[in-house]
Image (cartoon, rainbow, N blue to C red):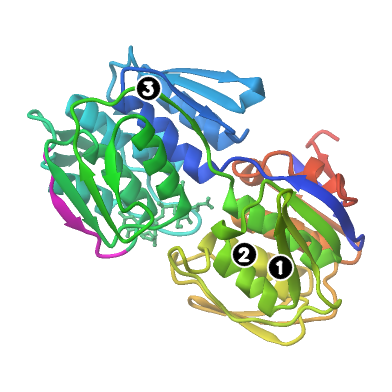
Amino acid sequence: MDSIRITGGTELNGTIPIAGAKNACLTLMPATLLSEEPLTLTNAPRLSDIRTMSTLLESLGVEVSSLQNGQVQVLSSHGADRHRADYDIVRKMRASILVLGPLLARDGVAEVSLPGGCAIGARPVDLHLRGLEALGADLDLVEGYVHARAPRGLRGGTFEFPLVSVGATENILMAATLAKGTTVLKNAAREPEIVDLADCLTRMGAHIEGAGSAEIVIEGVDRLHGATHPVVVDRIELGTYMLAPAITGGCVTLEGGRLDLVEAFAAKLDEAGIAVSESAAGVTVSRRNGRVSAVDVTTAPHPGFPTDLQAQIMALLCTAEGVSVLEERIFENRFMHAPELMRMGADIEVHGGTATVTGVKRLKGAPVMATDLRASVSLILAGLGADGETTVSRVYHLDRGYERVEEKLSACGANIERVSQDD
Ligand code: EPZ
């Protein structure tokens, strides 16, 4: 297992390119099942999760061609004739559940393993199942697998989500494009990845209104055709790297970054004393006057503060002036970075879904362990600003969602390297 070694204390200056969004690509790829014609995705990120999704789709009979060093994915489900997503793939990546709706819409049959929980929570899929039942699907749970049937095809229906779910919104949205009649989704997720999915499905011939709002209306069509779609830029990677100069000092431009995708996050950085500006080149970040002030953060569905940036902003607040209170309202166990940050000298008290961070002067480098994707990168960020050497182990978590993190940061002056196990 690789680890990442950082010697902190250097200011960062320069530019970092932001890739296509992992969480958009992971829902766009299964959309190929909705058409017999090829779907081409450009600006695709080069990540292990994308390779895992490719493997899953290939197990269903989809042809996946990865071109231009992985930045273009050409998917063709013309020959796809299998309907079972096996546990050994699904357990590695929860987003695998996103083949359920498209398979059901395409062939009226699907067997998808329940994903099981993960480090940050139980993460049930009950809303995915109830939403598909609202479209006329018959579902049974058999030995850890969802057996879904819609022999006469799916029919449009109305479904109100009792709580906002990104994945369930994506699954039902995709299924509804081929359902007979009109589907109305209420209290739908509003994330930019939902808008990107709707844009892609519309290019494929779907009739969708309201994506990005809490109510989405889909008029089912008989078939969808192929398309070419650019994956939207990754707002979580963008926010993550915006924190790097905020933590180290200096000035960094995030190429391809779009402020409209991170408004709530950027507002918090502004409140903390970080200058954020946007130009044709992207988003530029630096400290306004050398100081960072404590801020309170509460995570919420979009357009609120993203839960996927909570661990990262905590790394900044560990050395802010004052006391910050972070409320994690989306997942039940998403403070696993806190004990690792405390090994670096952070002053954090966690009670249930609330973490109180009292700023200290500086963190001290230490060996720390990654537990999940966003916690891993939070430790990297903390190491950039800490005195001395930090070694983050188990970085396979990191490689799921960040391409070439050590290259992108060292290009701006960070003293960071990947250390292989046998080094
Ligand atoms: C997506 O996960 C993202 N993953 C997550 O990013 C992100 O944190 C999350 O949305 C919230 O924004 C992908 O897009 C691949 P949810 P998802 O359904 O769809 C509960 C990362 O780091 N819930 O919006 O699984 C659930 O337990 C990952 O890139 C149910 O109760 O999230 C959670 O508490 C981590 N029943 C809340 O809803 C359901 O059927 C929000 O989950 C579904 C969800």
Is 108 drawn above or below residue 282 in the view shown? above
**SS label for mark 2:** helix
- Residue contact between numbered discs 3 and 2, judged by CB atoms under 8 Å: no
The amino acid beneath tag 2 is Ala
* Front label number (3 vs 2): 3
Q: Position of residue 404 (x, y in %)?
A: 73, 39
The amino acid beneath tag 3 is Gly
Q: Nearest the camera: 349 or 126? A: 126
Picture quarter containing residue 8?
bottom right
Q: Position of residue 118 (x, y in %)?
A: 46, 52
CA separation in Å, label 3 and label 1 = 43 Å
Q: Among all residues in the image, which is located at the extreme bottom?
A: 322
Measuring 86% from the left and 51% from the top, which residue is drawn there?
14
- Residue contact between numbered discs 1 and 2, judged by CB atoms under 8 Å: yes
Is 7 drawn above or below residue 201 in the view shown? below
**Which image quadrant shows ligand 1?**
bottom left
| Any part of residue 298 in sight | yes
**Magenta residues (range):** 155-163
The amino acid beneath tag 1 is Ala
Numbered badge on residue 291: none
Q: Is residue 67 magenta?
A: no
Determine which residue is flagged by label 1: 315
Determine which residue is flagged by label 2: 311
Measuring 45% from the left and 71% from the top, which residue is drawn there?
329
Q: Which quadrant of the figure contains the N terminus? A: top right
Q: Among all residues in the image, which is located at the extreme left?
A: 152
Q: Position of residue 360 (x, y in %)?
A: 80, 81
**SS label for mark 3:** loop
Mark nearer the N terminus (3 vs 1) = 3
Determine which residue is flagged by label 3: 226
